[in-house]
Amino acid sequence: MRTSLSLRVLGVLVLLLCPFVYGFAQTTDLHRVSNTPRSDGNGYVMRYHLSAPVDSFEIIQPAPDLIQMTLYGENIDTTGITLPEQSNILQEVRLYKLKYGYGVDIYLDENIYLKSNAYFDQNGKDILVNLENSSQIELERYAQQFLAINWYEELVEDDALNVNPPDSAPVSASYNNVKNKLRFDKIVIDPGHGGWDPGSIGYKGVQEKEITLAVGLKLGEYIEEHLPDVEVVYTREDDSYLGLAELGHFANLAEADLYVSIHCNSFHNPYVRGAEVYFLGLHKSDAAFEVMKRENSVFKNEVDRELSEEDLLVYELAHSGYIATSEKIAYMIEDQFKNRAQRKSRGVKQAGFQVLFEASMPAVLVELGFITNPAEQRFLTSEYGQSIMASALFRAIRDYKVEYEQKQAYNVSSN
Ligand SMILES: [Zn+2]
């Protein structure tokens, strides 16, 4: 399937206008609460996966091992919700349906000291709960300022909805909706640069944007042919340009399962060659920083935006759940480049690409090779070379999809 971006934008505009048309009829679907270690090792991040933003929320921590949240919104639907499993961090998550929304109790293990605060994700819908490593003394002092809420005084129904996932997830129509969300069925292909932005200029004047488009379209064709249940969304299908800031925005709107940004490298030394795969992260090496500066340069010229420490923290939280997935896919692609396509590999690296920052989903950026190296330039401008690279990407994505869906099927059936 191929979705035209302009139609998609139109559709999104219609969706955005809907609340004004239908008033309060729209429901907010809370289908999952997940918990992931923060990629910087400083704690954990919980994500409330929401189909639309709640009106507002509050978070308190009246005891070191109890976090209480209030989600305000008249039509929050939690049917079939998946909650994080009990672990040595998390004892239990309990939901209470209130007159004005939902109350949530999060019971932490009593031997662990995590201080909580919460943010709206940059996608504007999900809520992120930052659980940051703390000490017993600090946490006890912090908890003293809060009075625990007794949800039973505010309940709609008589008893609490104890939605402990393994036994009691109700099977209903929306259960299937939830199940569909667990499928890997949408991918964003981003052929780097385009329009007035040629990207790197290589040997014999070849432009990066031409190669990235050719390989991106081939990859899309392979996916459409061999994985017909996967929808392909392109950030561009011709020689047009989309600003990097817009790219990430589109990607979020598309709610895809993976974002693949395709690029080619350049260097002043023509002997340097090889493919690289990047995934998002804040722990960048100096070499990765150089590539990052180049690939981000378009963005920096356009919008001079300084990221505050709080921005970076929210980024870190927002992406913690995706970083492990992105890293896994990055290694699967690198393996294909190296062992199946027989390309020289420069490895998997972590960097803070703007385009990956903006995408609230697993995201990788591939550098197919150096177009300043004559041999790689010839390979990457040839039909043959482009097919090889596109099919290497395709195989990695197909293998990941199979693995992902097997895992999800296991999770669903073990409920
Ligand atoms: Zn590039």
Image (cartoon, rainbow, N blue to C red):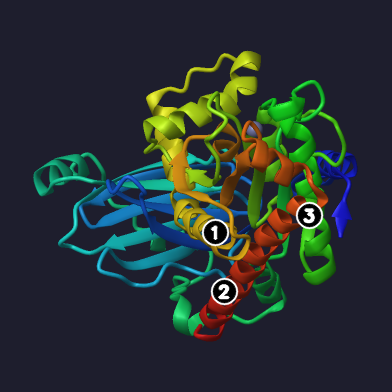
Amino acid marked by disc 2 = Glu
Element carrying mark 1: helix
Residue 43 pos. (x, y %): 29, 50
Question: What percent of the width, then of the height, locates residue 336?
Answer: 58, 62
Secondary structure of the residue carrying tag 3 is helix
Nearest to N terminus: mark 3 or mark 2: 3
Residue 9 lies in quadrant: top right
In the image, 182: left or right of 42? right
Neighbourhood count class around disc 1 (C-alpha, 10 Å): few under 14, some 14–19, many 20 upward = some
Q: Name the quadrant of the N terminus.
A: bottom right
- Above or below residue 400? Residue 203 is above
Image: 356 above or below 344: above
Q: Quadrant of residue 150?
A: bottom left
- The image shows residue 39 at horizontal and vertical percentages of 36, 49
Local packing at callout 2 (Cα closer than 10 Å; few below 14, some 14-19, many 20+) is few
**Residue marked by disc 2:** 403
User: Of 7 and 15, which appears nearest the observer?
Assistant: 7
Judging by the rendered image, the residue that carries numbered circle 1 is 338
Residue at 47% over, 76% down: 165
Compared with 3, 210 (above or below) is above
Q: Nearer the viewer, mark 1 or mark 2?
A: 1
Residue type at mark 3? Tyr
Q: Would residue 51 be visible to someone looking at this image?
A: yes
Q: Which mark is residue 384?
A: 3
Task: Identify the element where label 2 is drawn.
Answer: helix
Q: Is residue 235 left or right of residue 339?
A: right
Q: Are marks 1 and 3 in contact (CB under 8 Å)?
A: no
Residue 79 shows in this picture: no
Q: Are marks 1 and 2 in contact (CB under 8 Å)?
A: no
